[in-house]
């Protein structure tokens, strides 16, 4: 029996928008893989609380979605990647392999997120591209700005190098050449077993749509069997 693949989306989107609409679920199905899709709290079909403290443990919905026994492979983008890293660090025995994309130096910085939270809540981005990116996500049909602002203000906590040392499974780190979360060096150094794939001419937003990302992910998953 094949190992299921858990898919976790990025901020402001959903399992449907990130993984179904971009063809990932169909392609994994062609590989004979069962997909477990997760919508993070505040997103998609998940509850949408406006209290920041509700987002202390974004990984809880991932853990709830895991099969009763056995291991899974997992793929996460951006906020979903950070969430998966924390979940795998806490439950290393449940994961055979992990693919994370759209994360890097941002995991270790203590940035003031107030401007991003304000852009998500009000759509005022000051013509700053990074703020415009998050503001645009908040405006996608069906999104709840206040829930997303609360999620962004919290984000499920930081990731530490000590935490990441507990991630023992093989990890593929995927990062676009023009992604604003550069670089992945500290993340690679913190992981026990990892390698990096750089997507040429690719920014953060285009990463889930990248054919190079999809090909690298499928090759990596095949190598685990």
Image (cartoon, grey):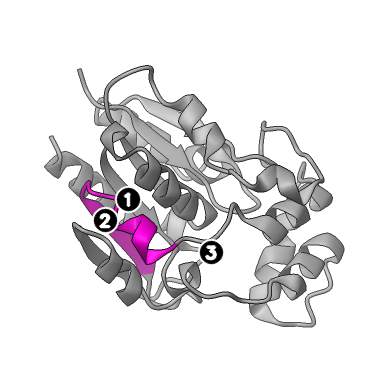
Measured from the top left, where is residue 30 in percent x and y? 28, 29
Q: Nearer the viewer, mark 3 or mark 1?
A: 1
Q: Position of residue 102 (x, y in %)?
A: 44, 63
Residue placed furthest toward the bottom = 127
Q: Of the two numbered discs 2 and 1 on the same chain, state the one appearing first in sequence.
A: 1
Horizontal side, residue 100 vs residue 216: left or right: right
Question: Residue 61, located in which quarter of the rendered image?
Answer: top right
Q: Residue at x 30, y 70 (%)?
A: 198
Q: Earlier in the sequence, mark 3 or mark 1?
A: 1
| Magenta region includes residue 106 | no
**Residue 183 vs residue 13, the one in the foreground:** 183
Magenta part of the chain: 160-175
Q: Quadrant of the C terminus?
A: top left
Instruction: Tell me if label 2 and label 1 are in contact, CB under 8 Å.
Output: yes
The residue tagged 1 is: 99
Q: CA distance from mark 2 to mark 1?
A: 5 Å
For the residue labelled by badge 2, is the local secondary structure a helix, a strand or a loop?
Answer: strand
Q: Are marks 3 and 2 in contact (CB under 8 Å)?
A: no
Is 9 placed above or below 36 here?
A: below
Quarter of image, res 210 = bottom left
Tell me the mark number nearer the camera, choosing from 3 and 2: 2
Q: Residue 120: x, y in percent?
A: 77, 62
User: Is 151 left, or right, of 169 in this rendering?
Assistant: right
Q: Secondary structure at mark 1?
A: strand
Residue that numbered label 2 is attached to: 172
């Amino acid at each position: 029996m094949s190992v299921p693949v858990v898919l976790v989306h990025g901020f402001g989107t959903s399992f449907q928008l990130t993984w179904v609409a971009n063809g990932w679920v169909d392609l994994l199905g062609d590989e004979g893989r069962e997909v477990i899709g997760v919508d993070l709290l505040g997103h998609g079909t998940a509850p949408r609380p406006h209290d920041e403290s509700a987002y202390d443990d974004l990984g809880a919905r991932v853990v709830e979605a895991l099969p009763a026994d056995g291991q899974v492979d997992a793929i996460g983008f951006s906020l979903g990647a950070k969430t998966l890293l924390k979940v795998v660090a806490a439950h290393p025995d449940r994961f055979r392999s992990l693919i994370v994309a759209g994360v890097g130096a941002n995991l270790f910085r203590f940035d003031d997120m107030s401007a991003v939270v304000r852009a998500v809540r009000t759509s005022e981005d000051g013509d700053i591209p990074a703020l415009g990116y998050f503001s645009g996500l908040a405006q996608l049909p069906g999104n709840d700005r206040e829930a997303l602002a609360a999620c962004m203000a919290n984000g499920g906590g930081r990731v530490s190098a000590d935490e990441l040392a507990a991630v023992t499974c093989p990890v593929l780190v995927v990062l676009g050449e023009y992604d604003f979360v550069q670089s992945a060096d500290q993340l690679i150094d913190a992981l026990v077993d990892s390698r990096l794939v750089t997507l040429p001419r690719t920014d953060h937003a285009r990463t889930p749509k990248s054919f190079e990302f999809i090909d690298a992910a499928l090759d990596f998953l095949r190598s685990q069997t």
